[in-house]
Image: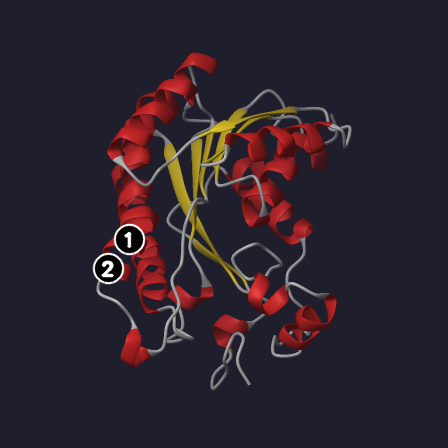
């Protein structure tokens, strides 16, 4: 293995990526499989995960994907997911907390129930799953090669932009702060904790704004770098944080937004 290959290799590592049947989670999972990892893909719809795993495996990477159902919206669902992970591996090198939901409504109509629902999955579910999987992460961790956690935040958690998704924006800001808190908590256990803060990517969650190529171009015109994100942007950042190159990075909120986090007076999706 060359010097450069070694910096970004995840060969032989085992990862869990939640919410990875589609979107950013699938982009991260694909990058890990292509670089040699065994990746457990979990989301609420097990059939979708199994199909995603088959499609990723067909790409010919040096790793492999396994797909199954996993729900992080309840304690019972998290317990079942942890049990499934433990049935498949006795150690976990990488955890990517990608599962999340959103809710959009005008300010005057935004429902009370949207707060508990969105924060329950995006923040409480993330924390509880991380805590329950910490023993497996510790087992894989070492001084030279820490275990890795990547949480999915958002540019909406760094900029005061809601576009009607008030609880989602607040939840992602909470994810960013929780990431730094957990980085401090878990560093003595040799586990790094970082977060992505993505701007617009094509996904099921953003299909209302990026579902067609024409829509994606219009949204991309609002981004300083002139386009929306693509799968390699997620895969590359994932391999950086999970490979040898990123072993000394913890507590970082990595902006994958084409410059939106330093742009002012803008909206993600609206005219």
Q: Nearer the viewer, residue 18 or 115?
A: 115
Residue 266 position within the rendered picture, expressed as x and y whole percent measured from the top left: 50, 83
Mark 2, other Cα within 10 Å: few <14 / some 14–19 / many ≥20? few
Instruction: Look at mark 1 in the image and give the residue it sits on.
Output: 117
Describe residue 207's horizontal placement relative to residue 120 as left or right: right
Q: Residues within 10 Å of mark 1 (few under 14, many from 20)?
A: some
Question: Residue at (54%, 75%) from the top-left corner?
Answer: 269
Q: Quadrant of residue 258?
A: bottom right
Secondary structure state at the residue bearing disc 1: helix
Q: Are marks 1 and 2 in contact (CB under 8 Å)?
A: yes
Disc 2, SS:
helix
The residue at 68%/74% (across/down) is 226
Q: Nearer the viewer, residue 118 or 259?
A: 118
Q: Which residue does the numbered mark 2 point to in the structure image?
A: 113
Q: Is residue 200 visible?
A: no
Q: How many marks do you count on the picture? A: 2
Q: Is residue 18 left or right of residue 114?
A: right
């Amino acid at each position: 293995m060359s010097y450069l290959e070694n910096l970004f290799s995840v060969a032989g590592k085992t990862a869990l990526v939640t919410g990875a049947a589609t979107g950013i989670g699938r982009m991260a999972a694909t990058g890990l499989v292509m670089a040699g990892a065994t990746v457990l893909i979990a989301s609420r719809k097990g059939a979708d995960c199994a199909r995603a795993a088959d499609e990723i495996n067909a790409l010919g990477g040096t790793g492999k994907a396994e797909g199954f159902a996993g729900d992080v919206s309840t304690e019972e669902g998290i317990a079942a997911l942890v049990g499934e992970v433990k049935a498949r591996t006795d150690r976990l090198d990488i955890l990517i907390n990608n599962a999340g939901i959103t809710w959009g409504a005008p300010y005057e109509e935004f429902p009370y129930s949207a707060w508990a629902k969105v924060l329950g999955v995006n923040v409480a579910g993330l924390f509880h799953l991380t805590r329950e999987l910490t023993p497996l992460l510790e087992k894989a961790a070492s001084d030279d090669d820490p275990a890795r956690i990547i949480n999915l935040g958002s540019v909406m958690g760094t900029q005061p932009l809601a576009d009607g998704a008030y609880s989602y924006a607040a939840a992602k800001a909470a994810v960013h702060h929780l990431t730094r808190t957990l980085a401090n908590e878990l560093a003595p256990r040799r586990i790094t904790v970082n977060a992505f803060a993505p701007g617009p990517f094509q996904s099921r969650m953003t299909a209302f704004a990026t579902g067609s190529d024409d829509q994606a171009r219009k949204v991309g015109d609002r981004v300083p770098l002139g386009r929306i994100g693509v799968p390699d942007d997620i895969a590359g950042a994932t391999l950086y944080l999970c490979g040898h190159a990123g072993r000394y990075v913890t507590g970082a909120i990595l902006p994958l937004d084409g410059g939106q986090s330093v742009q002012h007076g803008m909206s993600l999706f609206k005219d």
